Image (cartoon, grey):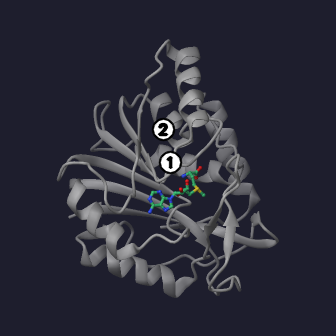
Amino acid sequence: MKVLKNWNEIGNAVNSLVKAGLPLHSTPAKCWDFNNIREVFSQSPFNESSHIVDLGCGPSLNGCMTLELLYSMGYRNLTGVDIHIPGYTRLAAAIRGFKKARNMKQYKMVTSDITATKFPDNSVDGAVLLSVVEHGVDLEKLFSELKRIMRQGGKVYLSTDYWEKGAGLGKDAMAASGALDNKALPWTIFDKKAVENLIMIAEANGFNAQGGGSIPPCEDRPVYWQDIDYTFIALVFEKK
Ligand SMILES: C[S@@+](CC[C@H](N)C(=O)[O-])C[C@H]1O[C@@H](n2cnc3c(N)ncnc32)[C@H](O)[C@@H]1O
């Protein structure tokens, strides 16, 4: 489990991705996640044909950004899932794939609720949830679905907005999505208690939190969105 400490960590992550010739996320702070994802998915049990899914892949003019990263790392069995995947994201993915490898279908994109996907049982080796669970996702339903679709030993990388004492967002807070239509999404910033609750739900559904349940302390607030300063927390779960 990692808490993003400061801007230095973001800068180091950007440099490390650039040196490795890997794509960056358009939100600089999420390059910290990209470097974490690179680390997690470079290890066993993953290989080129492992099925890795990006849950809440998001509307972007850059295609599904996490899948762009994983494709550049050599993965070839990738699927993005989101409740809303606009045409411009599909077009961007096709253009990027064509430019990179004359391949307009680098990865699949499926429009679906991530808590009720159509993936067969035990068919997924790895899952990424980047900046998703803070947007109104029912955690019980999510982990029950992950339990169904993930293979034994499969890994989940989950990163979310965090400030250990809470960031003072109201119950009905909404965040502009950053998509072209900027449709607002429900928004919460997890505090320590909420992360402990998330880990409890994951464990009840057969997932171990890597590194145990101890949450590192917050240091600085390098992330800024809608007049709030906070940070990110990243957790890795393995299906027992
Ligand atoms: C802030 S965006 C993050 C996009 C991308 N992961 C990234 O970090 O660049 C959150 C995404 O989660 C999606 N999302 C939230 N709840 C969802 C659900 N229950 N099923 C599918 N997608 C969901 C939203 O539609 C949105 O595209």
Q: Is residue 26 placed above or below 172 in the rendered structure? A: above
**Residue beneath disc 2:** 67
The mark nearer the N terminus, 2 or 1, is 1
Q: Nearer the viewer, residue 218 or 132?
A: 132
Q: Horizontally, is 113 left or right of 170 in the view?
A: left
Q: CA distance from mark 2 to mark 1?
A: 8 Å
Amino acid type, label 1 = Cys
- The local secondary structure at tag 2 comes to helix
Residue at the spot of label 1:
57
Q: Is residue 118 above or below residue 50?
A: below
- In which quarter of the view is residue 147 placed? bottom left
* Residue depicted at x 62% and y 42%: 60
x, y percent for residue 206: 22, 70
Residue 220 sits in quarter: bottom right
Front-most of 62 and 233? 62
Tag 2–tag 1 contact (CB < 8 Å): yes
Task: Give x and y (percent) for residue 145.
Answer: 28, 63
